[in-house]
Amino acid sequence: MASRALYSPRHPVLKKRDDFEDVLEERRRSSDLRYALRCYTPTLYKGLVPCKVSMLKSIVLQSDHLQCVIKQVSSESGDSTECVAEEASLILDEMAHRMQLSTVRFFVFTLSKAFKRLFRSVCVNEEGIQRLQQAVQEHPVVLLPSHRSYMDFLMMSYLLYMFDLPLPVIAAGMDFMSMKFIGEMLRMSGAFFIRRSFGGDKLYWAVFSEYVKTMLRKGYAPIEFFLEGTRSRTCKSLTPKTGLLNIVMEPFFKGELFDVSLVPVSISYERVLEESLYARELLGVPKPKESTSGLLKARRVLSEDYGSMHVYFGHPVSVRSLAEGKIKRSQYNLLPRYIPQKPSVDTHEFLNDAAFRLVRIQEENMVLKPWVLIATLLLQNPDGMDLSSLTEQTDWLRHLALAFGAFLDWPDHEACSEVISCSLALHRRLLSVSAGHVQLSVTDAPQVETTPEEAVFQRAVVVLSCASYRNQILHVFLRPALLAVAMQSANSSRKDDIYNCFNFLRNMFSNEFILCPGDSVQDFEEACYLLMKRGVLQVLEHEIVMSASGQSTLAFLCSVLEPFLQGYQVVCRYLCEETNENLTEKEFIPAVRSFALKLILAGRLKCCEALSSDLQKNALAALLRLKAVRKVKVGDQVTLKVNKIAVNSLEDTMGKSDVISK
Amino acid sequence: LHHQKSWQEIMKWNGWGYSDSRFLFNKKGQAEFTGKRYRLSGLILPSLKDWFEGTFGANLQHKSPATPTVNLSAVAPPNLNEPFIEDLKAAGVAASHDPEDRVFRAHGHCLHEIFALREGRIGRVPDMVVWPSCHSDVEKIVELACKHNVCLIPYGGGTSVSSALECPHEETRSIVSLDTSQMNRILWIDEKNLTAHVEAGIIGQDLERQLNEHGYCTGHEPDSMEFSSLGGWVATRASGMKKNIYGNIEDLVVHIKMVTPRGVIEKSCLGPRMSTGPDIHHFILGSEGTLGVVTEVTMKIRPIPEYQKYGSVVFPNFQQGVACLREVARQRCAPASIRLMDNEQFQFGHALKPQVSSIFTSFLDGLKKFYITKFKGFDPHHLCVATLLFEGDRGKVLQHEKQVYDIAAKFGGLAAGEDNGQRGYMLTFVIAYLRDLGMDYYVIGESFETSVPWDRVLDLCRNVKERIVRECKERGVQFPPLSTCRVTQTYDAGACVYFYFAFNYRGLSDPVHVYEQVEHAAREEILANGGSLSHHHGVGKLRKEWMKESVSGVGLGMLKSVKEYVDPQNIFGNRNLL
């Protein structure tokens, strides 16, 4: 029952969501071993063509598509076709999963144990599962979970096993494969491995895409991949990638399948396992290479309390309905379908648009815990807050968030103060509470002597960890916040002026947040609608006027975006002030980081978030997109050419407030 | 004209074919086919009722009978062009403005046309009918039509399924239906060159019968051949069941004579092929009555084949069947006809089995079924059947037969006997009668066709069938529709696919509209899956909206400029195609 309405209702408040059920409850009561060995009889796709793992490989290698590319590559490279075919076969060996029910059972057993230790509860919307059960029978299914933790895909397979759904095959990054034992285990539980980058490698692309499409066309298993491409280190959704989406949609475009169902899945954690690991990574402490021993060290992780976890299976989205009126399928009529074709401009635009909308659905179905609200407030008050005012403001924020359609999991019959103290206890590593005063602070600092730089970094780890919780709710406040900032910087109450500012900011931040391309007017209207309904604004025909009571809401919303504005300004300032001619792309992040650090140490910058490499990358991407910076390839190096006038003017437009004291 | 009148009298005015031949459920609730004309005539079909009720959720208690007779008072008075009539009379051409004659020629056999007639609704009809008896009569009529600015709509057998015969609503001039039925003679037969020169109004079965008397045939057997005319075949680019041996109409014609407002168009010799610029025959073939009237055609003829043999093959599933047909086409060894029915149609075919005459045949049938489903493991819900027709001299036919059955065996096909094959082809002629039975019980339906490259046949069939089911559901059809297809022709580079689609319309306020929406969606799906707009039914007015997409803007412009030159006054104003 794929829904036609991918476009979520414009009045988010009216959104109806399913109820949750804790799946661990049953696990705590009965034997995990017996559970892992129970009879597993998944619901199957009606058009399933039964096919063994080994068969799959030969079907892919014999496919017209791959044979055609092998010939092409062979004639271009001069290697014999046998030689290229052999290479293709090796690529496929490296890539392919070897799903085995016994391995899955082993995982189910161990994960049952692990999940029970890690989480208080794992909540799943059962109606979503029922919808998925329906969808799986009708059409091939693609599962699109959000990606915040390594846990994500383990949890997905675990849940599908639990509900007698077909186990998915999962597109995983190659880095897992280097974890010797675990890599193979994952392979046997359905993961297939793809290289991180293979841009120009025709043969690799052909093997990969044919492999995925074959499984889809045969209805072999649901395909699972992450639209965001990688784990989000910030808990903000990442700009989606369209490559795999194109691969899974193409069999529909080319008429090989009647339809494909895309199922967005939102996985949210009350406490992310990798919390401080991510913060360190963003600050430039390199990510430890995935290794089995590293994972064993993570045993320490097992002894902690990670609260609850929520998995929300969204409504299946039919590719057919999505593409209706947007994709002219007859464009594929004049070329044999096995000859690979680059997606046309229209198709590309469609894919991009669809990808953004799917990520928006993920965001909207992401469950938010009270701590997210608290973290938002604590970040805005770096000097800490009294417990009483924190309680009061959290309650205020809770109502604002609900009015904006947030999917908040707030305990029903508990006093606000009770809820807050529970949250604070769960996240005690990030804060200190003394004498009724709550403050973000460094709690585990064993070093006796720290340099000022180290102190800044330690603090930044806490701030970025905390920010990763605030980021979870950003999508709720984003549009009204952009409007709030636009009103502030427009210096005019004329609707046009405010819209222009809004549009500028939206454009500036479109690498930072999920903002569907082309939705500018809709977003503006949504923001106006929400704030008007809240009594913050009056929207007249040509003017937008703030209500007397709206001040605090607008101020709050502006501070939500403040760290980002400041961070972008730091990047702009760096590019204008510090760069010489030969700034290479590689040097960019460390250089901006040390520039920001200098500003912080000099007391000119308060905001630690400017140290985040994610923000710096996004800012650079925005500047490149806006053509204020150009990439120039010199030899092996890519250098950045800065148009200082353009960067300066962007910086000015962004922040008349001029936060960085000169 | 007597012949003409009698023809009109033995035909249904609001349904398919002969008045005496129709399906009905008798008092015992058993289906039977009346009349004496067909092999099935007079027989009881014991399983049709169950199939009918089961497939459509129909009920014999719920009847939707047709208006019994034409309500002549509903026919608008004719808009006559008196000067034209006077000149016509002077020229000695037979004419009539009798309402019955006019209503009879105002429609083809699209669902909406027949449905309206059954309800007694009559729209715009031609204002008069003329019956030319020869080429020069046509010349006179066209000349007078130009002189007096009347609109001419050529009418052959009236079997169009593209709204081609519908009078355009926007036409304000007097509309004259030009009925070619009196131009029905074979003018000469040339045994040296194996050609026959024939007047274009001749009906398929008459042409075949008369040639047979001389020991010849054309071999052109479209499913409508009992009623459709030679001129109609030319004007729509018709295709015959046995095209694998004899070719389609464009391969069969050697010479065409057509009267246009500009004069007569024809070639100067009977050479078998020419390089004289674009073939002018191809302006005429498929012109759907927009340029003129085809009056005479020189056609290839062949000696009647010595031996004919039907056959059939059962496949475990449709995929295997299509793979087999593809292989047969690859080896270019297709029999005169080879058709592959899907499972739904196979079951439908079974429902039309007449009551068995002896215990012995019934026992045999049981054995066959047992062998196929139990011993060979074919799933009765997936298996499908190919029907075959071989023609030629006996030795070659038997050899050919073996070759085809050997190929079929490679795709899991089992020979399933001559009877099944023959019944498959008989179905072709009676299936149109079945629609009328359905319409008596709230079931409406129609067929449509396309042609598609081999590699897309399966995908197209699956997607179109599924699209139909889905669209019906979305539009509030209460019962799952019958959505079935068969591959009816094979070519080197692709195949012709024929869809049947029917549903129970109880509970719908505007069933014809729903039907049209679903058919529209199905056509969109065909085009999106690499199928053509039409293989042989033509475009008419029904599929006009897709012409530009189908032949490109330039292509359409070319056709329009031809129309503009040939018929600047739009005398042939049926508004088909362009």
Image: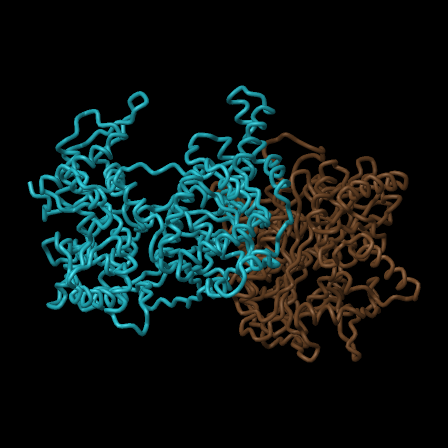
- In the image, is residue A647 above or below residue B575? above
Q: Is residue B146 visible?
A: no
Nearest to the observer: residue B576 or residue A443: A443
> Is B493 located above or below residue A498 in the figure?
above
Looking at the colours in the rendered structure, which chain would you say is drawn in cyan?
Answer: A
**Is A578 placed left or right of B132 in the picture?**
left
Is A620 or A120 nearer to us in this picture? A120
Q: Give the quadrant of residue A485.
A: bottom left
**Residue nearest the observer in this picture, A176 or B46:** A176
Chain drawn in brown: B
Decide if residue B20 is on the left or right side of residue B521: right
The image quadrant that residue B464 belongs to is bottom right
Image location of residue B453, percent across then percent down = 62, 42
Give the color scheme: rainbow, by chain, secondary structure or one colour.
by chain
Q: Is residue B234 visible?
A: yes
Q: Residue at x 33, y 50 (%)?
A: A237
Q: Is residue A449 above or below residue A584?
A: below
Front residue of B101 and A132: A132
Image quadrant holding the C terminus of chain A, namely top left
Give residue A389's position: percent from left, percent from top: 15, 65
> Left or right of B486: which side holds A14?
left
Could you tell me residue A49's position as x and y percent?
Answer: 64, 49
Question: Furthest-left residue in view?
Answer: A662
